[in-house]
Amino acid sequence: MDTHKVAIPSLLKKKKEKKKISVLTAYDYPMARLMDEAGIDILLIGDSLGMVVLGYENTLPVTMEEMLPHVKAVSRATRRALVIADMPFMSYQAGIGEAVRNAGRMIQEGGADGVKIEGGLVALEQIAAVVRAGIPVMGHIGLTPQSINLLGGYRVQGKTREEAVRIVKEASALEKAGVFSIVLECIPGNLAGIITDRLLIPTIGIGAGPSCDGQVLVSHDMLGMFSGFTPRHTKKFVDLNPIVKEAFQRYRSEVEEGLFPGGPQSFTMDEQVAREIENLLNERS
């Protein structure tokens, strides 16, 4: 495994050499540390934390102030991977000034290497402005969860001719605006293949088939840690939910039965000191 810091030129080189890029969402220090040591290329602090960490129904309530502590934690844990922070809902939609200011906070305060911004043509001006400010931007088109109310639910995008043509145009426009890669979410695999072949920058798929230059998953989904909705495109590489729950149940039982803590988890003082303290307390009483 290459231990050098992942940089944007190395991602472009991977695409050129047809080497796949691995991306996972990260939200805290210990998990980010493990992902980094495992050689994951990009750690994305996704606004998905709203659902899998904070318990919201969707990503819309997540704010900059909720995102930044997680961005800081992941950045502190990471030595090799590229750290990308999701721009939450209404952190960039209100205008170019807000977009640049908030993206700058992700870099300056959060320690991220770049940001991800959802949306194609509707977010193009903000994306271009953030890039001009010297901040790397990862695009995100197809199913964009921040537009879920407009899209009418979580459904595959690009299945009709009109939708497919729009998504292809958006991908080209984002590349011209200067994004260094694009997330393609929940679009047909053959459409993702067409887009990937047309672009010089890497595509990162989630529910977009195997033709993309890389793949991203929500870490809680691939670890089986999120007991709510499990998307069809997710693969559980391990199901930790029952394992962790069993550990909690064993802990509770051992506490209730007086089995924990035992000798190995306990500390003792010198017996002579203990007797002296007991005698002293008896004298005072």
Image (spheres, rainbow, N blue to C red):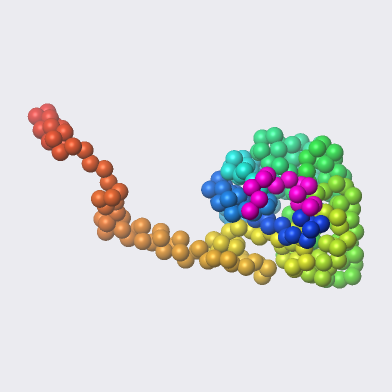
Placement of 236 over or under 42, stated as above or below:
below
Residue at left offset 86%, top offset 52%: 174
Choose between 104 and 134: the one closer to the eye. Answer: 134
Region in magenta: 1-13
Whether residue 118 appears in this view of the structure is no
Task: Residue 278 in the image: state x and y as whole percent.
Answer: 13, 35
State the image coordinates of residue 21 (x, y, percent, origin top left): 72, 57
Instruction: Tell me where residue 272 sits by quadrant.
Output: top left
The verdict on residue 5 being magenta is yes
- Which residue occupies 88% across, 61% down? 198
Residue 50, how many percent across, how many down?
A: 62, 52
Residue 239 shown left or right of residue 127 in the figure: left
Q: Nearer the viewer, residue 31 or 254?
A: 31
User: Is residue 123 visible to us here?
Assistant: yes
**Quadrant (top left, top right, bottom left, bottom right) of the C terminus:** top left
- Considering only vertical position in the picture, is 77 above or below 156? above
Against 105, residue 25 (above or below) is below
Is residue 182 or residue 10 the one in the foreground? 10
Classify residue 231 as left or right of residue 7.
left
Tell whether 244 sits left or right of 214. left
Q: Going 32% across and 60% down the picture, which residue do you hit?
A: 253
Q: Is residue 218 magenta?
A: no
**Above-or-below relation of 273 to 182:** above
